[in-house]
Amino acid sequence: MFAGLFFSTLWFALRWADWARLKKKQQQHVFFGAMVCLFFLWNMRVEMLPGFFWHLSGMVTVTLMFGWSLAIVGGSVVLLGIVVAGLNDWGGYLPSAILCVIMPATLTQIMLGLVRAYAPKHFFVYVLVNAFLAGGLVFVIMSGLIVGGLLLMGAHPWGDLQHSFLNMTPMMLFPESMLNGWITAMLVGFKPHWVGSFSDEEYIQGK
């Protein structure tokens, strides 16, 4: 099931990705630089339970910068690099790719579409909803799915998950929201051409 979902999603991501954007050398540097940042960010982790780690994600920001397709391609490559480096095991690659790469990118893209359709097109709306709020919401949903998956697989009992992870969720939600929010705010303020989902004409001029 995991393999079918991952490879079918990856196929669509590869097909729909904005490869023309990466033909520009500056955008190549930004994309690969973002992937390097993700690699180090995902390695700054805390072991909550044996074999169960928590780390900041940053997938919301990457999706806002490069879109759903390139975020999934890049995130999958970064996760593969972590496995090859021996920091994760191969058996956990597919579930991790689905829960920590595909799901955050998809939720971020859905929220972006809803905000574009129904919310005022304003700089603060873009940053507060698509970055700060999305960062926290995606983390909560991702945490719930991970805990549910661990329970279904019988990897850890409910009591251990509740004590070691769920009780810490409010404290972990805040840094995830702040990370995506502040990075996005700085990028759209100083390097808006790096953020593919943002447009000065749409969100700033004439407001």
Image (cartoon, rainbow, N blue to C red):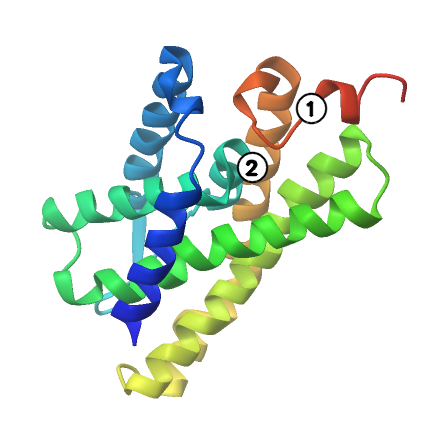
- At numbered mark 1, what does the secondary structure look like: helix, strand or loop? loop
Q: Is residue 53 visible?
A: no
Give how far across and how far down residue 142 sits, in percent: 48, 64
Mark 2 neighbour class, 10 Å CA radius: few under 14, some 14 to 19, many 20 or more: many
93 to 161, vertically: above or below? above
52 to 20, vertically: above or below? below
Residue position marked by numbered label 2 in the rendering: 64
Mark 1 neighbour class, 10 Å CA radius: few under 14, some 14 to 19, many 20 or more: some
> Camera-side residue: 56 or 31?
31
The label shown at residue 199 is: 1
As drawn, the residue found furthest toward the right would be 206
> Camera-side residue: 175 or 148?
148
- Tell me: 95 left or right of 85: right
The quadrant of the rendering that contains the C terminus is top right
The label shown at residue 158 is: none
Quarter of the image where one finds residue 1: bottom left
Give how far across and how far down residue 186 sits, in percent: 60, 22
- Tell me: 204 left or right of 206: left
Give how far across and how far down residue 116 sits, in percent: 75, 43
